[in-house]
Image (tube, helix red, strand yellow):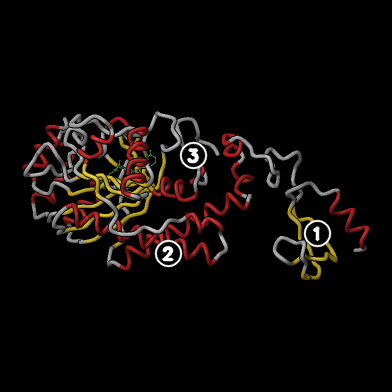
């Protein structure tokens, strides 16, 4: 093709069309990546329609809703793609950290007869002639597998919660990274394992992104272990409501994050010894023998955002049944879960970590929805 022909072909081509160009690659100071292609011929593979519903190279940003409505075009932006490179590196790094520590990877059912995290956020579905639910967490199954003698297990899988609230940190489908470990001596052993895995995963993620020239690498903090453990009573004091045994709301968590940064210089920290009153519905959480008003349950937060919940589980059947009763949960529906507790269940503990929240904070995204390719929330089922 002659130069004028080429020029005409490009000039009339709508943006985002897909073309095959042949030519000579040469060095160029002006080009973004230091090279440019001097075209000899161009073939149009697909013509894009115009106008575009969402600009891909425009400097002006669009509203999040518009971006998500036209997500495929949105994902073409290099800065958006960079988030999913981070996500890929993070997931690979976590998997490697688990495998390094001899964990077995498990895949538990997502269609269940019973929920584990309370009825309010269960999605029901018609299952032939029966009622079933989407899994809110692999909680019961990861515990059952400890009963199978699988001493260390992990799962990276979707979890579903009917969260009616429209917030920047809740979605209805998220990816949960769950772990469960048998024969643990106490909650502290679980915390030590968790912080070691997160620290390793962050270090590896940073290295992978740096090697790819992804600028998000610089945003990945180094996690210096051990990180602070802040007992719940200390948190209540910071919040100016000692002994109130109330759960932590979004604003409370933010306040705690600020205090932890100011007083402990910490961006990652544990909140330990959650009150039994706060974990009343969490029947599987072990209450402390010395003080039954406290549990062996903790959160791992990053700069005021809860990333992980975990703790020691109740492995003693009598107490587990008592917890269920106190929580108003009928054990009759949980026979499959309870059976291993009758036939030799080791002490165990573990955690669930929300990958989407971690991606959100690491990439500095204002809204958790941006951490998923095609997010689901109260109002969004498409695309
Ligand atoms: P929890 O309910 O605290 O604990 O959930 C664990 C982690 O999952 C993430 N998460 C969410 N992320 C986005 N949108 C949501 N709607 C959402 N809900 C939860 C958070 C949270 O810290 N079975 C226990 C874990 C365990 O004890 O092992 C559980 O699910 O990052």
Mark 1 and mark 2 lie on one chain; the one further toward the N terminus is 1
Mark 3 and mark 2 lie on one chain; the one further toward the N terminus is 2
Question: Residue placed at 69% from the left, 43% from the top?
Answer: 59
Q: Which mark is residue 43?
A: 1
Question: How many angstroms separate mark 1 from mark 2 (CA)?
Answer: 41 Å
| Quarter of the N terminus within the rendering | bottom right
Mark 3 and mark 1 lie on one chain; the one further toward the N terminus is 1
Q: Within 10 Å of the Cα at label 3, are there few (<14), some (14-19), or many (20+) other Cα atoms?
A: some
Instruction: Name the element at disc 2.
Output: helix
Rendered image quadrant of residue 172: top left
Q: Which residue, given by chain and number where applicable, does mark 2 sit on? A: 204
Q: Nearer the viewer, residue 355 or 293?
A: 293
Q: Nearer the viewer, residue 124 or 131?
A: 124
Where residue 93 appears, as percent x and y from the top left, is 41, 62
Q: Is residue 206 visible?
A: yes
3 and 1 marks in contact (CB < 8 Å): no
Q: Which residue, given by chain and number where applicable, does mark 3 sit on? A: 367
Where residue 115 appears, as percent x and y from the top left, is 26, 38
User: Is the CB–ligand 1 distance for label 3 below 8 Å?
Assistant: no
Rendered image quadrant of residue 333: top left
Question: How many angstroms separate mark 3 from mark 2 (CA)?
Answer: 25 Å
Q: Name the front one of labels 3 and 1.
A: 3
Instruction: Name the element at disc 1.
Output: strand
Question: Residue placed at 17% from the left, 46% from the top?
Answer: 296
Question: Residue placed at 56% from the left, 54% from the top?
Answer: 82
Where residue 119 appears, as percent x and y from the top left, is 27, 31
Q: Is residue 26 left or right of residue 278?
A: right
| Quarter of the C terminus within the rendering | top right
């Amino acid at each position: 093709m002659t130069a004028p022909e080429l020029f005409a072909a490009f000039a009339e081509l709508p943006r985002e069309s897909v073309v095959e160009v042949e030519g000579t690659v040469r060095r160029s100071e002006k080009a973004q990546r230091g090279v440019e292609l001097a075209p000899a011929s161009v073939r149009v593979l697909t013509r894009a329609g115009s106008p575009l519903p969402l600009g891909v190279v425009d400097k002006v940003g669009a509203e999040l809703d518009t971006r998500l409505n036209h997500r495929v075009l949105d994902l073409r932006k290099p800065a958006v793609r960079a988030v999913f490179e981070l996500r890929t590196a993070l997931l690979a790094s976590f998997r490697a950290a688990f495998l390094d520590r001899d964990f077995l990877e498990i895949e538990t059912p997502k269609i269940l007869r019973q929920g584990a995290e309370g009825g309010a956020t269960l999605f029901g579905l018609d299952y032939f002639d029966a009622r079933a639910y989407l899994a809110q967490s692999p909680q019961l199954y990861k515990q059952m597998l400890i009963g199978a003698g699988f001493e260390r297990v992990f799962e990276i899988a979707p979890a579903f919660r009917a969260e009616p609230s429209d917030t920047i940190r809740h979605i209805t489908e998220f990816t949960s990274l769950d772990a469960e470990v048998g024969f643990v001596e106490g909650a502290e052993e679980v915390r030590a394992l968790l912080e070691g895995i997160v620290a390793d995963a962050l270090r590896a993620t940073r290295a992978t992104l740096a090697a790819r020239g992804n600028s998000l690498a610089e945003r990945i903090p180094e996690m210096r272990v051990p990180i602070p453990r802040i007992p719940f009573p200390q948190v209540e004091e910071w919040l100016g409501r000692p002994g109130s045994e109330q759960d932590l709301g979004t604003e409370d968590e933010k306040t705690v994050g600020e205090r932890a940064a100011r007083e402990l210089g910490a961006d990652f920290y544990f909140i330990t010894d959650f009150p039994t009153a706060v974990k009343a519905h969490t029947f599987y959480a072990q209450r402390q023998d010395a003080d039954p008003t406290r549990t062996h349950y903790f959160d791992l937060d990053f700069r005021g955002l809860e990333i992980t919940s975990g703790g020691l589980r109740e492995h003693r059947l009598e107490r587990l049944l008592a917890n269920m009763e106190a929580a108003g949960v009928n054990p009759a529906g949980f026979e499959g879960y309870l059976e291993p507790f009758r036939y030799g269940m080791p002490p165990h503990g573990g955690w669930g970590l929300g990958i989407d929240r971690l991606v959100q904070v690491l990439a500095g995204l204002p809204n958790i929805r941006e951490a998923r390719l095609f997010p689901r929330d109260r109002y969004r089922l498409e695309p």
